[in-house]
Image: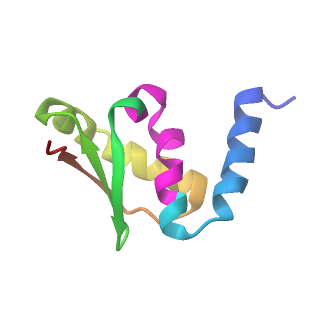
Amino acid sequence: MEPVRTGLRNILADLIRGTSVDEAVMLAWPLVCGKEVAERTEPIGFSRGILTVDVPDATWRGQLAAFSGKYVSGYKELLGPLVTDVKFKVKTQ
């Protein structure tokens, strides 16, 4: 039997696939990065395969940059090879 989390992820992936590419990438961010990271970050743009994400400070930027490959792999698993890189930008007030 398939775990509930995997089933929910598949349902959400199907829903996201019905949107535009840009919208799908933005909507998928919480699925790719996880709840805690999603609560403190915000995807702000997607262009030419690069997703730009606002982060609260330089410490977060440095820590999340180390995981950018993991996030690209997560997107590939969920949506295919749309996202080639994730860049983190400190949110300006």
Quarter assignment of residue 42: top left
On the image, the x and y values in percent for residue 78 come to 59, 52
Quarter assignment of residue 31: top right
* Colour option used: rainbow
On the image, the x and y values in percent for residue 23 come to 51, 62
Q: Residue at x 42, y 25 (%)?
A: 36
Say how many tags the image has.
0
6 shown above or below 48: above
Quarter assignment of residue 37: top left
Residues in magenta? 25-38
Is 8 on the left or on the right of 75, as rendered?
Answer: right
User: What secondary structure predominates along the stretch shown in magenta?
Assistant: helix
Q: Residue at x 41, y 52 (%)?
A: 72
82 shown above or below 26: below
Is 18 on the left or on the right of 49, as rendered?
Answer: right
Return the residue found at the far bottom: 48
Quadrant for the C terminus in the image: top left
Return the residue found at the far front: 93
**Is residue 33 found inside the magenta-colored segment of the image?**
yes
Q: Residue at x 32, y 39 (%)?
A: 67
Q: Nearer the viewer, residue 43 or 80?
A: 43
Q: Residue at x 72, y 45 (%)?
A: 10
On the image, the x and y values in percent for residue 90 come to 16, 43
Is 56 on the left or on the right of 82, as rendered?
Answer: left
On the image, the x and y values in percent for residue 61 come to 19, 38
Return the residue found at the far right: 1
**Is residue 37 found inside the magenta-colored segment of the image?**
yes
47 shown above or below 72: below
Quadrant for the N terminus in the image: top right
